[in-house]
Amino acid sequence: MNSSSSTVPSPDFSGLWIPLVTPFRDGAVDHAALARLTAHLARTGIRGVVVCGSTGEAAALSKEEQLACLRTVAAHAGGLPLIMGLSGYHLPDTRACVQRLAAHDVPPLGGLLVPAPHYVRPGQNGLRAWFTELADTSAVPLVVYDIPYRTGATLARETLLALAAHPNIRAVKDCGGDPGKTLALIRDGRLQVLAGEDAQLFATVAQGGAGAIAASAHVHTRRFVAVLDAIAVGDLARARHAWHPLVPLIKALFAEANPGPLKALLAAQGWCANELRAPLTAASGSHARHLRGLSGALAAAD
């Protein structure tokens, strides 16, 4: 292990994190819109933001565009901690990206969100080696992104528990679809468990999870924060009161390919253009109207 990973201070990944969309205009990253959206969200009580995750269409961004997005967000996040998404399937290249991020030293980078290598589907020994190598290399903590339906690789419960022993692996974004594994990680206590499926936010945190990385919380953000705050103090009645009206909106935001519906709603609110990079496409007109209706009803109730 390198010296940097052995001296990383203990981070706190609890609370609500927003995996930012990447606004586009005429095919290019719209940094002005990204700056406005970041500054707005930073004032809503969230814990921090994730840059260049799957909601941010990172797979459609060049490495230079990703670094530029990180700089823009860092400049407008009001000092909130940042997590940077990082993915790949070629270990030397991915390790070089980790080192490149360290060399650019964009504060206040709090962690890296790293999934299993996509497409190649390694076994459990290979997965342990992948995350261990990157954790050894990184100057900031890793958040393991357990999302088998995107990577094709399932992280077994035993693998995650083994990775929890690494001092530079501190949290997991849980999209694994296995409630038993989720609860085992929460009970083990070494990794902070963050709900990655928005509809599972309430259940995960109520069982002792640390928080969530929730794309749908771009909108009605303070209500999402209120849900987590109420659970934190044991007021489940207040938490349910805030949570239940969000559920239909969450469902609708993922009824078509993410982030199409989310960008349609953000565009209707004036935050960005309703533009995605191919092969992703914009939400259908009828669905966009449905989303506006759901969001408007929630706004009236707030």
Image (cartoon, rainbow, N blue to C red):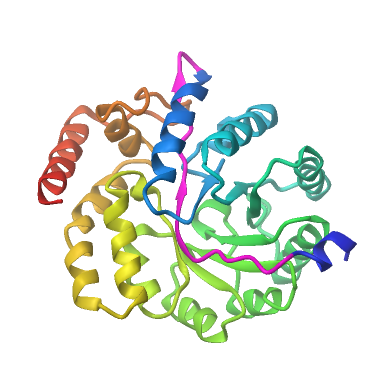
Instruction: Answer with the quarter of the image where residue 137 lies.
Output: bottom right
Which residue is drawn at the image coordinates 43% and 67% (left, top)?
A: 177
Q: Position of residue 143 (x, y in %)?
A: 62, 61
Query: Does any portion of residue 27 appear in the rendered image?
Result: yes
Which residue is drawn at the image coordinates 44% and 25% (left, top)?
A: 33
Q: Position of residue 131 (x, y in %)?
A: 73, 62
Specify whether 126 is left or right of 181. Answer: right
Does the segment drawn in magenta span residue 15?
A: yes
Residue at the limit of the structure toward the bottom, as seen here: 187
Which residue is drawn at the image coordinates 22% and 33% (left, top)?
A: 288
Q: How many marks?
A: 0
- Position above or below: 134 against 72: below
Near-viewer residue (248 or 179): 248
- Position above or below: 48 against 25: below
Residue at the limit of the structure toward the top, as seen here: 26
Query: Does any portion of residue 2 appear in the rendered image?
Result: no
Q: Position of residue 147 (x, y in %)?
A: 52, 59
Which residue is drawn at the image coordinates 40% and 48% (left, top)?
A: 215
Near-viewer residue (184 or 220): 220
Near-viewer residue (248 or 149): 248
From the image, which quarter does the N terminus lie in? bottom right
Does the segment drawn in magenta span residue 197?
A: no
Q: Position of residue 278 (x, y in %)?
A: 47, 26
Specify whether 106 is left or right of 299. Answer: right
Task: Specify the principal SS of the magenta part.
Answer: loop
Instruction: Answer with the quarter of the image where residue 267 lies.
Output: top left
**Which stretch appears magenta?**
9-27
